[in-house]
Image (cartoon, helix red, strand yellow):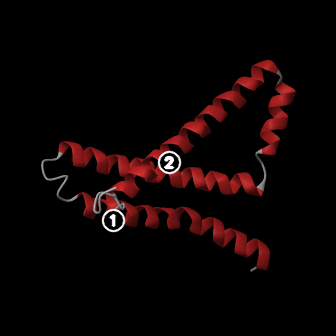
Amino acid sequence: MPAGTLYRGREGMWSWVAHRVTGVLIFFFLFVHVLDTALVRVSPEAYDTVVATYKTPIVALLEYGLVAAILFHALNGLRVIAVDFWVKGARYQKQMLWTVVALWVVLMIGAIYPVLGHAARELFGS
């Protein structure tokens, strides 16, 4: 391969990868959600058993992962729309990506902070 032809990945490539990965994760969640909801028609007892397995700390953590994926996918989707339909979008795509990342971090901290505060109160009492 000639020197200089390997794409080393910049912000645009990583946002593209993250957008695809979050989209697949959201699709997988929706697929599982439809399947477990359809289970109620087959066997209400089996449905109750499956839903009971969702009430674990691991699944609660996965739910925050789902919130993170949906939030990033939505914010980055707005950035992609701006790049595609705004005349100057391509010129400012890097700045818009960092704005999306900063906004995502602030919103995720806002989403997780009350849970961490509650967990600390439960663990350490106050």
Q: Residues within 10 Å of mark 1 (few under 14, many from 20)?
A: few
- Above or below for 110 versus 80: below
User: Closest to the observer: 28 or 52?
Assistant: 28
Considering every residue shown, the one lying at the far top of the view is 42
Say which amino acid is labelled 2: Thr
Residue shown at 43% from the left, 61% from the top: 104
Residue shown at 69% from the left, 28% from the top: 35
Judged from the image, the secondary structure of the residue bearing numbered disc 1 is helix
- Provide residue 31's location: percent of width, then percent of height: 61, 32
Q: Which residue, given by chain and number where applicable, does mark 1 sit on?
A: 98
- Provide residue 65's location: percent of width, then percent of height: 59, 55
Q: Which residue, given by chain and number where applicable, does mark 2 sit on?
A: 22
Cα–Cα gap, marks 2 and 1? 17 Å
- Above or below for 50 versus 14: above
- Above or below for 106 versus 46: below
User: Closest to the observer: 41 or 84?
Assistant: 84
Find residue 70 and name its label.
Answer: none
- Above or below for 44 versus 19: above
